Amino acid sequence: MRTRITEMLGIEHPIVQGGMQWVGLAELASAVSNAGGLGILTGLTQPTPEALQKEIARCREMTDKPFAVNLTILPTIKPVPYEAYAQAIVDSGIKIVETAGRNPEPFLPPFKAAGITVIHKCTSIRHCLKAERIGCDMVSVDGFECAGHPGEDDVTNMILLPLAAKRLKIPFLASGGLGDGRGLAAALAMGADGINMGTRFMATIEAPIHDKVKQKMVEASELDTALIYRTLNNTARVFKNSIAEKVLEIEAQEGPTRFEDIQPLVQGTKGRELFDDGDLDKGIWSAGMIVGLIDDIPSCEELITRIVAEAEEIISQRLGQMLSA
Ligand code: NAD
């Protein structure tokens, strides 16, 4: 499959791995890139900009294919030196960056000067149009189904993707609710030039997280996610475990929610421990509605090959036959 995005990113298949906190390490990013997709290292998973440079170097030893770095700008418990992370990305010679969370305008001059292709993750059409206007090269359109931060508008990809196709000139990825060949074919039909998958890549052999987390996703249904931080205007879709339920109880109490009241439950370090030791109720972990469609834990190569083959079959056989009948 050739699309504007495979051409611009220099990849074989129109499949990009989402930037995921604690999961986007060199093991996963290199496996996705080696399988012909675009792997992404998560910038803030590394404790310092220097550590990020080392992780980039480690990933380069594991693949000679293109890979990207994600820089997410959202509220955090500890202040993050974003400029230093951006500089580390530039200094490492990275050529593709995924920005997310907030307007990436302040980072565009150094990224553009370094010849970096910028993909900005957007949860609404107005943000997509703004990203196009300020010079992003492509956007990742993140529907309400997605893991992590879906924004506050609650519009699904069935609406967002055709809207993006109507309004944008730059190419876009469909993100959220994607994990199989049907999803890829549908996203392409709705005007996307490829897909971005996060949660689906967590349930792969190479994802650097505990097997119990992967197994839990295989068992889960589409009803097993929850939206937390709604009351703080920082909504996040996470796996519906006992900690997410406790956060929802606190948020449902009368009066405004104070972040301090939920911080001990949600801090990212607990989520990291959960991924490391497989204690599924230690903290919160991001997961999208696609968990309802995940039935196995393949390698990234098997997964990408299967998704592309399924999509090709749907397009050439099922849809093709409808026209020739
Ligand atoms: P963290 O430990 O600093 O914070 C934990 C969670 O609380 C995060 O979701 C954060 O957004 C939220 N939070 C922090 N301070 C807040 C405040 N004052 N008001 C409302 N919410 C607040 O975060 P972390 O786990 O180290 O992750 C680092 C960054 O990566 C965060 O900005 C986080 O949102 C982001 N992240 C993004 C995704 C994604 O969907 N791409 C997934 C996980 C984490």
Image (cartoon, helix red, strand yellow):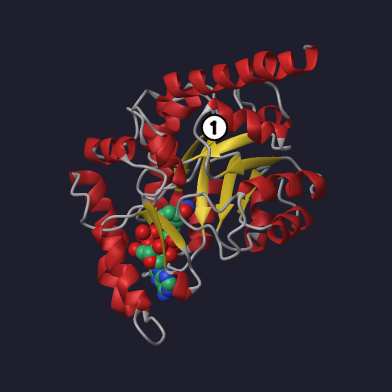
Report whether 19 appears left or right of 246: right
Residue 165 percent across, percent down from the top left: 77, 43
Q: Which residue is mark 1?
A: 38
Residue at the spot 61% in from the left edge and 64% down from the top edge: 153
Residue 294 percent across, percent down from the top left: 40, 33
Report whether 2 appears left or right of 239: right
Q: Is residue 317 visible?
A: yes
Residue 312 percent across, percent down from the top left: 63, 17
> Ligand 1 quadrant?
bottom left
Q: Residue furthest front?
A: 325
Between 216 and 172, the residue placed more toward the observer is: 216
Report whether 263 appears left or right of 235: left
Question: Hey, what amino acid is under mark 1?
Answer: Leu
Indicate yes or no: mark 1 CB to ligand 1 under 8 Å: no
Q: Quadrant of residue 215?
A: top left
Q: Is residue 35 above or below residue 134?
A: above
Residue at the spot 55% in from the left edge and 30% down from the top edge: 66
Quadrant location, the N terminus:
top right
Residue 273 percent across, percent down from the top left: 22, 52
The total of numbered circles placed on residues is 1
Q: Quadrant of residue 49?
A: bottom left
Between 119 and 149, the residue placed more toward the observer is: 149
Bin the neighbour count of mark 1 within 10 Å (Cα to Cα): few under 14, some 14-19, many 20 and up. many
Residue at the spot 46% in from the left edge and 69% down from the top edge: 75
User: Secondary structure beneath disc 1?
Assistant: loop
Quadrant location, the C terminus:
top right
